[in-house]
Image (cartoon, rainbow, N blue to C red):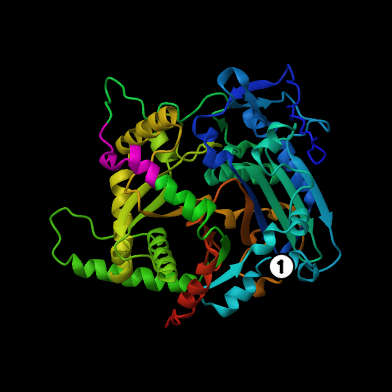
Amino acid sequence: MNFFRTKKHPRTPPPTVPTDTIIPLSFWDCEHHVSGLSFDITFRFDDVLDHEALRAALARLLQLGNWRKLGARLRRNPATEGGLEYHVPQTFDDKRPGFAYSSATFAMPIDAHPEASRLARPQDFATADRPAVFSTSFAAAPAFRAFIRTPGFPERLDDWLYSDSPQLGIRTIVFADATLVTISFLHSLMDMMGMHAIMEAWTAVLRGEEDKVKPFEGFAHDALAGLGKPTVTAPLQKYVFTDTLLVGWSWILFGLRYLLTTEWLWHRREEERLIFLPGKHLTQMRNQAMAELTAANSKPEPNTPPPFISEGDVIFAWWTRVALRAEKPSPSRTINLRNTYCCRSLLAEMGYIPSATSALVTNAVFATLTFLTVGQVLTKPLSFTANEIRKSLLQQRNVEQLHALIAIQRRVLEEEHHPALFGDPTMRMMMMSNWVKADLFAVDFSAAVVSMGMALEKRANLVGRPSCVQGTGTKAYATRNTGVVIGKDARGDFWLLYTLRKKAWKGVERELSAMGDVVG
């Protein structure tokens, strides 16, 4: 007798609304690594904002052209083996709003609130002006999530599938001297450049400049559908790492190592933290790296461009070295550095979208790969690793290699039902996604400012622009050794969010403490 069993009733999705426009999700928006991850992006403004003006502007945006797709509901289609699809309402009302929205007002300073005061204070980091880490473990606490997110808004894929919830959740919290705005969404909706497109359009409507809202691209078609498909005039090239594709036993070995070391048994506990990197420290590291590369290239070949590495190259190289010093893996172990990039410029080059700056709200991000050993990263100068990352970008971020990569990824996903991985089965992976071009710190809500919360002489950010941007979320899988560069703030300092094995963070703190002061 099953006295202690409770009968589980199967969840039923809401009935289909006949007037909804039904649109299949794009191939890449259906992938597990995006549909299994939701974001809560919180902007801190050092001013009091009119939350109703923000709400009204976003509601108006969803009335313009095809921007109503942002209010889609997520469903599975049994006829396509459970493929994901959007059900887009023709119009929105109180019963079926275009986005979930809530607000709260507190007649107190932000630092006096028990939950808001737990967020990072950018002024404290700027005063110290040294690299530092900040624990975000509080972000998973139920009390904090209830405070920062719209009540009842979905957190996981199934929550969207079995509710009539829209894709976006907006939460505004107004204090006597500041405002927090949190935007929540499932990663299947968009990448960060998609979010950038939304913020551009939202702020244009807020300013009363609807004529500057760009047309919404890809309402009923997949702008990436042509990737990886050969044509008579453009046969596929060979992908640069084709010969290292993990198949058969090599894939099984990699999968077992991943499950044992990351998901199940060893080192299961992981922790995500915020990292503050002062701009002057990055400038010093980049200048030194550029000087080393220039010295090594004292006799360049004719027509060879001078050495160049970006701030992003240096950040990824620096952080990889910091993490490896903290965790101390075998010097001979292979490191697969996965550096994500937005392919919108390549889509424009191929004519799939009008321009690289089109309002394409989807996932259009892929990765370049750099293979090194732990020993190379730890013993060679930072300039070496940064330059290898740059060379990989030049080699792989082009139309030909993108087509070649996508052809392999599609085939492996459709035939083997797992992502295509390249390298060796014992490799360690480090992934970095750079959000700097999304300009999150440049979001301009000045048209909604009611009063200034902090004097201009005490801050670097302009009125109505965020002083800090922080991210949390819900994950259906381990994200060890992955993270993002959130952006560059008004002082020129950088903010990262990264996940490592929990015990590694003490080593990271030691590494950052050992970084000397910048002279000059």
Counting other residues with Cα less than 10 Å from the Cα at mark 1, is it few (<14), some (14-19), or many (20 or more)? Answer: some
- In-image side of 85 versus 356 (left or right): right
Image quadrant for the C terminus?
bottom left
Q: Position of residue 261 (x, y in %)?
A: 47, 55
Q: Give above or below for 480 relative to 165.
A: below
Q: Give above or below for 497 relative to 199.
A: below
Residue at 13% over, 57% down: 301
Is 236 or 296 nearer to us in this picture? 236
- In-image side of 409 versus 489 (left or right): left
Residue linked to disc 1: 118
- In-image side of 236 versus 30 (left or right): left
Q: Quadrant of residue 408?
A: top left
Asked if residue 293 shows in the view, the reply is: yes
Magenta segment, which residues? 237-253
- In-image side of 373 versus 434 (left or right): left
Image quadrant for the N terminus?
top right
